[in-house]
């Protein structure tokens, strides 16, 4: 598709115009944490950032979502949010995470109206990554610092200006409606930039055979070893752009009840606890195994891709430095002998 | 610190060889700059992995109760192991709390007290450096030279990079120990008055509540604070109970607040101010201002500081007629 570019000085003007038509979201500093937050004035938006501390999944899967509400007499009419949104400056790993979430929430069998509506009402303007962090490993899991999967528009920082490329028809329309801010450009110099960025990812890990490797080691004692220092908290999952597991809870209202969908996490003991009191994953090692297996085996089995985009948030924010890259290495290095029961 | 590290390695290897310990809990090198990671050594040959540097921040006492937990998968339990732990002041204080609350059998615990210089916090360093990622750090004396991704070197006094709890720590040595490595610091003084806390404690009840709610609104309920806290060993946390459900798990601030109020009140007279909760929090919630209020209250109202005396009965377990009660009868 046609490419264009925009002078960095023009960006505030563009953002002002966009926020007149859409609710604008983007990276902003929220009390020391970079979050994909609502941009109320364009100065808040920071494009000189590495990646947000917490991923943008909250904009598609809120931490608590009322699925339905009963006021004691009747169901409360619940209209899905029709907010038209633009997320500006999201990193390619997080955009790719949306493409992975699509595979789960928008399938032939399952159509999640909440997720799909938000996805349809949102234009994702990605900002390619020139400075991946040492904890980044998107290229290991099939992504790219200049990847465009999951995005509608891809922007690339080339110093004084940003190159822009429409990825989807929605993105093409977006660029067309704001074309007065952009200069037409034959073909931008993406390749060199992209290559440089790719070379900055230093994580050397080959996970080509990770699925069969994990499947073979399901009963291996190595899980006990790798999970020893894990605290069993949910920091990794809650920051992760692809962890989507949820719980459905009933909450009392003043006159009735509402069903709320909340974030949940397989590292929590309560996650699999049965009503009988039995817990099939009663130890931390079984829970960590579930987390890793879901991302690198079950996701692959169902959707043909890994469920990890290599954004590195779990690496950076794990309180005990349980580095998922190291865990995968240890698992792959473990002898393939099922532990005798 | 290299010297201390050598002695830690030697001691660990010796304890394991002589079967005086089945496991040594310490630190090893991590995958990130300015970090160390907890490690578990069971074989004398592996003791070489142990490190001792300015980044050994985690409170290792968190792992102690689990070492003595029963295995749900076997009928005949193994006898409890002998566990050795490399202990800074805070690890030691937490260990005292766990012994006191019968979570760890004293006779099976080998507390190896090591001199703690106050640990450095990579998050604080990164904040000072800015967006360019920290690549490495080198120490010489009290100076820390941090190199970032652009190749730039920035010099800091190590005091500037101290973890928050370490800035205000007054007890850098484990109060109870079985072995000592190096020369333990005696007592200690907080680097500076805790201005943020002073400001908080001067506020009216309403203002304090506002600050509490504002700060907690950042929380995503990932439970990292609870999981990193050695005092949070409950087999089933009140927040995980389902009959009844004490707190919601949802987004409303109400749920977040009920969880934190519950957790914090359980810390009254028990919190040793190690700062593990704050450092574990991925969202940068300032929990310490609130937990420190409990530490201060325990001290001022009951002359009690947690983590020092295995024998003394904790204030909230004991009743004395002359107990301070004006916070009930004359609330602010």
Image (tube, rainbow, N blue to C red):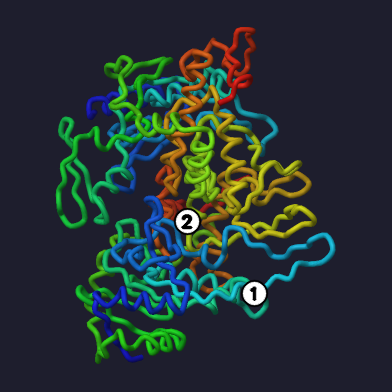
- Mark count: 2
* Residue sticking out furthest to the top: B321
Name the chain letter of the residue that bears numbered label 1.
Answer: A
**Mark 2 on the same chain as mark 1:** yes
How would you rate the neighbour count of disc 2 (Cα within 10 Å): few for under 14, some for 14-19, many for 20 or more?
Answer: many
> How far across and down, in percent of the image, does residue B303 sit?
49, 13
Give me the residue at 43% from left, 32% from top.
B59
For discs 2 and 1, the disc positioned in front in the rendered view? 1
User: Dot 1 corresponds to which residue?
Assistant: A113
Would residue A143 be seen by someone viewing this image from the given angle?
Answer: yes
User: Dot 2 corresponds to which residue?
Assistant: A239
In the rendered image, the vertical position of residue A26 relative to residue A82, given as above or below: above
The answer to whether the residue labelled 2 contacts the one labelled 1, judged by CB atoms less than 8 Å apart, is no
> How far across and down, in percent of the image, does residue A248 sit?
69, 58
In the rendered image, the vertical position of residue A87 relative to residue B305, given as above or below: below
Give me the residue at 55% from left, 33% from top.
B264
From the viewer's perspective, is A240 left or right of A275? left
> How far across and down, in percent of the image, does residue A318 sit?
43, 47
How would you rate the neighbour count of disc 1 (Cα within 10 Å): few for under 14, some for 14-19, many for 20 or more?
Answer: few
From the viewer's perspective, is A246 left or right of A135? right
Question: Label 2's element?
Answer: helix
Return the mark for residue B212: none
Question: Label 1's element?
Answer: helix
In the rendered image, the vertical position of residue A213 relative to residue A77, given as above or below: above
Rounded to the nearest whole Å, what is the CA distance between mark 2 and mark 1? 23 Å
Name the chain letter of the residue that bears numbered label 2.
Answer: A
Would residue B46 be seen by someone viewing this image from the given angle?
Answer: no
Give me the residue at 38% from left, 68% from top.
A91
Give me the residue at 40% from left, 55% from top.
A30
């Amino acid at each position: 598709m046609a490419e264009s570019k925009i002078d960095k000085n023009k960006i505030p003007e563009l953002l002002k115009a966009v926020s007149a038509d859409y609710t604008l979201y983007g990276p902003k500093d929220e009390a020391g944490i970079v979050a994909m937050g609502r941009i109320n004035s364009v100065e808040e938006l920071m494009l000189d950032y590495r990646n947000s501390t917490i991923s943008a999944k909250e904009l598609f899967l809120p931490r608590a979502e009322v699925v339905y509400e009963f006021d004691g007499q009747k169901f409360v009419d619940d209209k899905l949010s029709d907010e038209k949104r633009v997320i500006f400056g999201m990193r390619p790993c997080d955009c790719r995470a949306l493409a992975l979430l699509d595979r789960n929430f928008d399938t032939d069998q399952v159509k999640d109206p909440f997720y799909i509506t938000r996805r349809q009402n949102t234009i994702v303007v990605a900002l390619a990554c020139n400075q991946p962090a040492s904890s980044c490993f998107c290229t290991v899991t099939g992504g790219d610092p200049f990847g465009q999967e999951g995005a509608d528009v891809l922007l690339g920082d080339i110093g004084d200006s940003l190159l822009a490329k429409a990825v989807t028809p929605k993105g093409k329309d977006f660029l067309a409606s704001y074309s007065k801010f952009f200069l037409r450009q034959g073909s931008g110099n993406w390749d060199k930039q992209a290559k440089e960025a790719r070379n900055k990812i230093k994580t050397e890990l080959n996970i080509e055979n990770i699925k069969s490797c994990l499947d073979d080691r399901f009963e291996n004692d190595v899980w006990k070893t790798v999970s020893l220092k894990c605290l069993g908290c949910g920091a990794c999952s809650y920051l992760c752009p692809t962890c989507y597991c949820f719980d459905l809870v009933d909450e009392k209202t003043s006159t009735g009840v509402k069903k709320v969908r909340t974030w949940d996490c397989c590292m929590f003991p309560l996650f699999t606890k049965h009503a009988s009191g039995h817990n099939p994953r009663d130890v931390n090692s079984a829970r960590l195994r579930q987390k890793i297996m879901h991302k690198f085996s079950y996701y692959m089995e169902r959707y043909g891709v890994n469920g990890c985009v290599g954004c590195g948030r779990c690496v950076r924010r794990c309180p005990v430095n349980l580095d998922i890259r190291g865990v995968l290495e240890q698992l792959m290095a473990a002898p393939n002998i099922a532990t005798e029961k | 610190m290299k010297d201390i590290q050598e002695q830690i390695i030697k001691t660990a290897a010796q304890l394991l060889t002589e079967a005086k310990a089945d496991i040594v809990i310490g630190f090893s090198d991590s995958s990130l700059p300015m970090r160390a990671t907890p490690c578990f050594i069971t074989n004398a040959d592996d003791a070489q992995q142990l490190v001792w540097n300015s980044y050994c921040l985690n409170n290792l006492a968190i792992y102690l109760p689990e070492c003595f937990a029963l295995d749900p998968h076997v009928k005949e339990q193994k006898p409890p192991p002998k566990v050795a732990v490399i202990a800074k002041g805070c690890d030691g204080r937490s260990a005292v709390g766990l012994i006191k609350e019968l979570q760890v059998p004293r006779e099976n615990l080998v507390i190896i007290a090591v001199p703690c210089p106050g640990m450095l916090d990579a998050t604080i360093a990164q904040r000072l450096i800015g967006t360019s990622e920290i690549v490495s750090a080198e120490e010489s004396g009290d100076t820390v030279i941090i190199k970032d991704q652009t190749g730039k070197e920035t010099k800091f006094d190590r005091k500037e990079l101290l973890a928050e709890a370490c800035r205000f720590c007054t007890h850098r040595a484990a109060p109870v120990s079985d072995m000592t490595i190096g020369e333990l610091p005696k007592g200690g003084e907080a680097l500076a008055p805790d201005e943020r806390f002073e400001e908080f404690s001067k506020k009216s009840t309403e203002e304090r509540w506002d600050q509490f709610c504002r700060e907690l609104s950042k929380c995503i309920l990932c439970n990292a604070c609870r999981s990193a806290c050695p005092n949070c060993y409950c087999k089933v946390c009140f927040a995980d109970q389902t009959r009844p459900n004490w707190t919601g798990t949802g987004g409303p601030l109400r749920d977040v607040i009920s969880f934190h109020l519950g957790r914090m009140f359980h810390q009254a007279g028990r919190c040793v101010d190690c700062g593990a909760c704050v450092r574990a929090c991925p969202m940068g919630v300032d929990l310490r201002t609130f937990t420190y209020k409990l530490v201060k209250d325990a001290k001022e109202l009951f002359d009690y500081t947690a983590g020092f005396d295995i024998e003394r009965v904790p204030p909230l377990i004991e009743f004395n007629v002359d107990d301070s009660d004006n916070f009930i009868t004359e609330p602010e």
